Image (cartoon, helix red, strand yellow):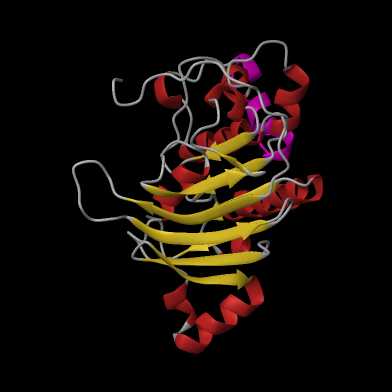
Amino acid sequence: MKANPEREAGLTLPRPKGRLSVEAVTYVPPLSSKPILRGVTFAIEPGEVLGVIGPSGAGKSTLSRHLVGVLAPSAGAVRLAGADVSSWIKTSLGQHIGYLPQDIELFADTVAANISRFQEGEDRDVILAARMADVHEMILRLPDGYDTQVGEGGAILSGGYRQRIGLARAIFANPSLLVLDEPSSNLDAEGDAALADCILQLKKRGTTVVIVSHRPNTIGVVDKILVLRDGVAEMFGPRAEIMSRLTRAVPVHAVQGSAG
């Protein structure tokens, strides 16, 4: 708490367009001398979809946390529409960002409250987000529908249900930037296809999407690919170009990477 004091209220910035720029980001965890990210630099425009791939331990999840302002870089900056996300007032920034981490945490409340991020009077947006995440019909089959109590951590739900409800929460209220860290890890083939369709719908809306995944269905909808290895941006560019470079270098099954 002392190391991270709460910021005083400041100027509330307008809703950002989704241009995301990562400027020479380096991150060294506290009490460590070894960087997890080293000079990572790239930029994507509003409405673009970026796929982040690489081997386990490459720094993909750490990069995801930086993009949404959960972690602040040791050096460099992450900017959304030109503003540094680590210095943006969090209550304001949270309205414009959706995040689905690898470990999905649901709260001991209703399905609707979890999707709406505990905002009142947003029923239409809750149902719209659930439909986009292809979980609306599944929710209606729960004992009390959207009013079903999910239990601590979403205990009454399967992994696939939790993942889809977590996705609905991430896309609630049409964020400018959406960051998905292995969003299909608990999904079957039908859920995987629904996720790809959801990403395409978001792209049409102009939402910028960053997705950490090695699933072919998901990588197939991205515009650009970032390859991370040992915390370094090894490759970045259009999907076709990067996939061509990767397949020339090593067999296809070896380049798909894994979560980490």
What kind of secondary structure does the magenta stretch mostly adopt? helix
Q: Residue furthest toward the right? A: 204
Residue at 54% over, 83% down: 245
Q: Quadrant of the C terminus?
A: bottom left
Instruction: Count the numbered circles shown.
Output: 0
Q: Would residue 214 be visible to someone looking at this image? A: no
Residue 164 percent location from the top left of the image: 58, 38
Q: Nearer the viewer, residue 237 or 173?
A: 237
Q: Position of residue 6 (x, y in %)?
A: 42, 18
Q: Nearer the viewer, residue 134 or 226?
A: 226
Quarter occupied by the N terminus: top left
* Left or right relative to 9: residue 193: right
- Stretch of the chain drawn in magenta: 130-147
> Residue at the top extreme?
120
Q: Residue at x 45, y 60 (%)?
A: 40
Q: Quick check: is 132 in the magenta stretch?
A: yes
Residue 85 lies, in percent from the top left, at 54, 38
Please, is residue 202 above or below residue 154 in the view?
Answer: below
Q: Inspect this view and state whether residue 171 appears.
A: yes
Rendered residue at 59%/53% (across/down) = 21
* Residue 219 within the magenta-colored segment of the rendering: no
Counting from the top left corner in percent of width and height, residue 110 is at 56, 16
Q: Is residue 112 left or right of residue 161?
A: right
Q: Quadrant of residue 44?
A: bottom right
